[in-house]
Image (spheres, grey):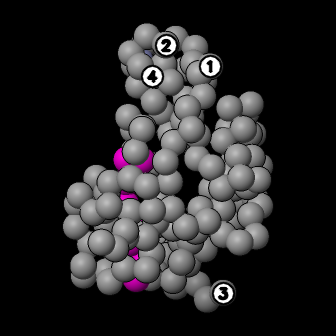
Amino acid sequence: MSVQSEELGNTGTLIYPSRIRLPYTWHVGKVGSRFYQEIKDNCKIWGIKCPKCAWVFVPPRETCPRCYCDMREWVELSDTGTLLTYTVTRYAVPGIQPLEPPFALGIIKLDGASTGLVHLLGEIDLNDISVGLRVKAVFREVREGNYLDIKYFKPIRA
Ligand SMILES: [Zn+2]
């Protein structure tokens, strides 16, 4: 690794840009475990419904952030949805991006859900993405029980 330094103004203070890699594990809990297991085993995306406001959250969570009540009613969602918004990443940030740029990320409202799901967009010309686009999940052939078991969402061709 090469280290570059720059002097900061006339203070004589040097700045050494660098990165810290920090391995970690993340406990996804009972609700998260079921969500990822269903994607891994069955290529099914499930949400969870609030008994009070009736919103369906995906990814699912134990407590409704609107009503603060426990949620236990699982709802099988479609693998199709509507693109609410998106961004195209054209700059590389090594070590943290799921793909080499350029690539697109979108927020997709699955049919039957009340909330949006952030994910990659694939099989699409990056200059041909628009809000309101209908998309469908593409699952990896070999799934490992994580978020990228959904490879990306692709446009539904008419
Ligand atoms: Zn609620």
Q: Give how far apart the Cα atoms at labels 1 and 2 are.
A: 8 Å
Residue 53 position within the rendered picture, expressed as x and y whole percent measured from the top left: 38, 15
Using the image, determine if residue 122 lies above or below residue 84: below
Q: Amino acid at mark 3?
A: Met
Q: Report the residue at 45% width, 30% height from top.
A: 56
Comparing labels 3 and 4, the label whose residue is closer to the camera: 4
Q: Give how far apart the Cα atoms at labels 1 and 4 are.
A: 14 Å
**Mark 3 touching mark 4, by CB under 8 A?**
no
Q: Which residue is mark 4?
A: 65
Q: Which residue is mark 2?
A: 51
What kind of element bears circle 4?
loop
Sequence-first tag of 1 and 4 = 4
Q: Which residue is mark 1?
A: 72
Q: Amino acid at mark 4?
A: Pro
Determine which quarter of the picture holds residue 86. bottom left
Answer yes or no: disc 4 within 8 Å of ligand 1.
Answer: yes
**Mark 2 touching mark 3, by CB under 8 A?**
no
Relative to residue 121, is residue 77 drawn left or right?
A: right
**Mark 1 touching mark 2, by CB under 8 A?**
yes
Task: Say whether residue 103 is magenta.
Answer: yes
Sequence-first tag of 1 and 2 = 2
Q: Amino acid at mark 1?
A: Arg
Sequence-first tag of 2 and 4 = 2
Q: Amino acid at mark 2?
A: Pro
Q: Report the residue at 37% width, 68% height from top.
A: 156
In depth, the one of 140 and 126 nearer the eye is 140
Sequence-first tag of 3 and 4 = 3
Residue 40 position within the rendered picture, expressed as x and y whole percent measured from the top left: 73, 55
Q: Which residues are magenta?
A: 102-110
Q: Report the residue at 32% width, 61% height from top.
A: 134
Q: Which quarter of the rendering shows the C terminus?
A: bottom left
